[in-house]
Image: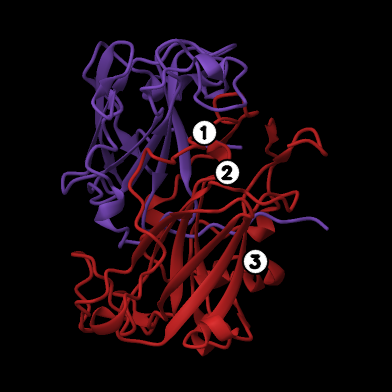
Amino acid sequence: MKFVPTSEATLGPFFPPRYVDERAHDLTTFEGRPAKGEAIEISGRVVQEDGAPLDNLVVEIWQADARGIYRHPADPRHAEADPDFLGWGRAATDKDGRYRFRTVRPGAPEGRAPHINFMVMYSGLMRILKTTLFFADDPVLSLVPRERQDLLRAKGKSPYEFNICLRGENETPFFDD
Amino acid sequence: MAIVIEPRDERTQPARIIAGYPQTPLRTPAQPLIRRAPTLSELTGPADFSGRIGLLGGDVAGRGAKQAIGQLIHLKVRVLDEDGAPVGGAMVEVWHANAAGRYAHPNDDDHAPLDTNFHGAARVLTDAAGLVELRTVKPGAYPVPTKDGWWRPPHIHFSVFGRVWLSRLVTQVYFPGEPLNALDRILNAVPDPSARERLIARLVPPTADLYDALVYEYQIVLRGRNATPGQS
């Protein structure tokens, strides 16, 4: 028998604030112990087609540690992963549509350039949207049409600005898997 | 354990733009999504939350004088992968409206009354058999602010973390026998009738230890199967 993945649905407008834990947007420490690597800040505004900022939208990130290791058994190097770095974070946007993360600069995983995976969940989004912030040229970035690649590149230095436009002019490229 | 993620049957997933759900055309990307082959980055994920995030327990209903108003329900949810294997240690977040159809959330300004004993949120980890049990009250239906006659049927929101990043799931679970199910714009956005049917929990005969609640069973299937069958 084939088990078919459950259908997705929108997060709706009432995701409990208590699930956006106070420190879930700060990946640089765990139980008071600092993660290894260079602390960086990433923030941005999330807007819809008419440019209106989106409030209480949920953004989650997943990334490798400073040495490019994922804290997950599928990574052959996971036993060496930084024990003080969770790799996952969650933030909600404020009334201005702004989210904010503090994390460490990811290292380069095998075959990839340093990057951070993003997910966006919200009312009116019937499925999770997935995108990626790239710190260098990367095989996955090369799949994005050239004229849109700059929208996914981390520019300058920390604090980085990564705006997410769900639809319309300067629409963020999103991935399907 | 290496996980394989394959494209889903589109008919089992909801339309992204829904007639009569005015936020969907403003927030759904107009450009085609970019297909990529998953790499280690997407085939890993936050699989171990134990001790790293605050859990809330699975009792949403409360007890005694602090019990929420409404029909007590006991929901047994099993989290599986596409092999049908249980996903243990998966973090499951649950939230829903109170018995009157009002969320304990500052953004819900519906007329329905709040219940001071109901916060409507549970956060739990599945056990080794992939099971979570929730004790709560049955949520009420409520009118959507489109004010054109759309009422959401009683439903419970689920956010689930699987073994890898691409297993992440946000969904809603419905109740059997609700006339509003057939009219709901979100539930009916899923084209495949069998997939819609699977979003509805199943009422099962109560057992003696759960005599005071209506017992429902539900199964969640997360994306991903074992790359090397027979091993785990």
Chain to which the residue tagged by mark 2 belongs:
B
| Residue depicted at x 29% and y 74% | B145
Q: Nearer the viewer, residue A83 or B177?
A: A83
Q: Amino acid at mark 3?
A: Pro
- Report helix, strand or loop for mark 2: helix
Residue beneath disc 1: B45
> Crowding at label 1, few (<14), some or many (≥20) Cα neighbours within 10 Å?
many
Q: Nearer the viewer, mark 2 or mark 3?
A: 2
Please tell me if label 2 and label 3 are on a single chain. yes
Q: Position of residue B141 (x, y in %)?
A: 39, 83
What is the C-alpha distance between the residues marked 1 and 3?
30 Å
Q: Colour of chain B?
A: red
What is the C-alpha distance between the residues marked 2 and 3?
21 Å
Tag 3 or tag 2, which sits nearer the N-term?
2
Q: Quadrant of residue B191?
A: bottom right
Residue beneath disc 3: B191
